[in-house]
């Protein structure tokens, strides 16, 4: 079972799971987000979700962390081990917030396709028990649980409503904005990160003037280079060493 734990400095969260968990999640994310350019307007958001798939793949190759966690079920004399070995990798909080919101829309696109645009596609026999959807929803639930451990209890209801807003749109998304948010978040100290995380979540959800400015810059750069928005490099450079 996939679960998340906040990193010591609240830079992000560490995603934990065993090999089967990671393989199943990787396959589900790839399936839910579709083939390359299957939904051209959503390619920017798709690439960010596939960034999680890349991390899953690196973890499966042994290129990320491994953690021994006590086996809570080791109360029986039949238990073989007192600790379980989990694979783990870290993701920035702004990135995680966007990914979990984007997955809502990808799930809608996916079930509409699988149910052939039938009425109430989510309740259609072809999608209602779809294992990929179930896997993605479980991952989103794990993200939400970890997120709620960082923000004040009084803010949980309001921010969860925003993160699941029907008005959030990831079409033609300028994903370079996430790099700006990640970079600025890294510049904060530990306590400031906790304080600003709700603000960052709202910025992602509301796509206000800061986002619109970045999107305009990305569009202009794409036109100048006769390319696509997804081909424009981030406007920031991540530090080589990150204190998670």
Image (cartoon, helix red, strand yellow):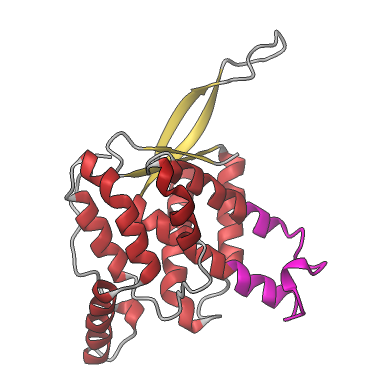
Q: Is residue 185 left or right of residue 106?
A: left
Image height of 168 relative to 73, above or below: below
> In the rendered image, which quarter is residue 217 located in?
bottom left
Q: Nearer the viewer, residue 126 or 55?
A: 126
Instruction: Please provide percent x and percent y for residue 150.
Output: 37, 41
> Which image quarter is the C terminus in?
top left
Q: From where the camera sits, is residue 180 visible?
A: yes
Tell me what residue is drawn at x 45 percent, y 43 percent. Answer: 148
Q: Nearer the viewer, residue 58 or 28?
A: 28
| Residue farthest right in this picture | 125
| Residue farthest top in this picture | 77
Image height of 141 relative to 7, above or below: below
Q: From where the camera sits, is residue 33 visible?
A: no
Tell me what residue is drawn at x 51 percent, y 32 percent. Answer: 86
Instruction: Please provide percent x and percent y for residue 186.
Output: 21, 50
Q: Which residues are magenta?
A: 107-135
Instruction: Please provide percent x and percent y for residue 122.
Output: 72, 68
> In the rendered image, which quarter is residue 63 located in?
top left
């Amino acid at each position: 079972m996939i679960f998340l734990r906040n990193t010591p400095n609240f830079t992000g969260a560490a995603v934990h799971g065993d090999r089967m968990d990671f393989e199943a999640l990787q396959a589900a994310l790839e399936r839910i987000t579709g083939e390359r350019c299957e939904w051209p307007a959503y390619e920017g958001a798709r690439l960010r979700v596939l960034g999680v798939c890349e991390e899953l793949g690196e973890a499966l190759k042994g290129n990320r962390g491994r953690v021994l966690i006590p086996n809570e079920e080791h109360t029986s004399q039949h238990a073989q081990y007192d600790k379980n070995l989990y694979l783990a990798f870290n993701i920035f909080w702004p990135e995680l917030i966007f990914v979990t919101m984007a997955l809502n829309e990808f799930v809608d696109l996916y079930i509409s396709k699988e149910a052939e645009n039938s009425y109430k596609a989510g309740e259609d026999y072809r999608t209602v028990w779809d294992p990929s959807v179930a896997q993605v929803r479980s991952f989103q639930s794990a993200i939400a649980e970890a997120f709620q451990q960082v923000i004040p209890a009084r803010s949980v209801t309001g921010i969860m409503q925003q993160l699941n807003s029907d008005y959030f749109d990831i079409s033609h998304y300028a994903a370079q904005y996430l790099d700006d948010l990640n970079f600025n978040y890294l510049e904060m100290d530990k306590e400031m990160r906790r304080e600003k995380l709700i603000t960052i979540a709202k910025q992602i959800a509301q796509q206000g003037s800061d986002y619109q400015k970045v999107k305009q810059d990305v569009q202009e750069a794409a036109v100048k280079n006769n390319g696509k928005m997804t081909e424009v490099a981030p406007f920031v450079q991540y530090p080589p060493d990150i204190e998670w």
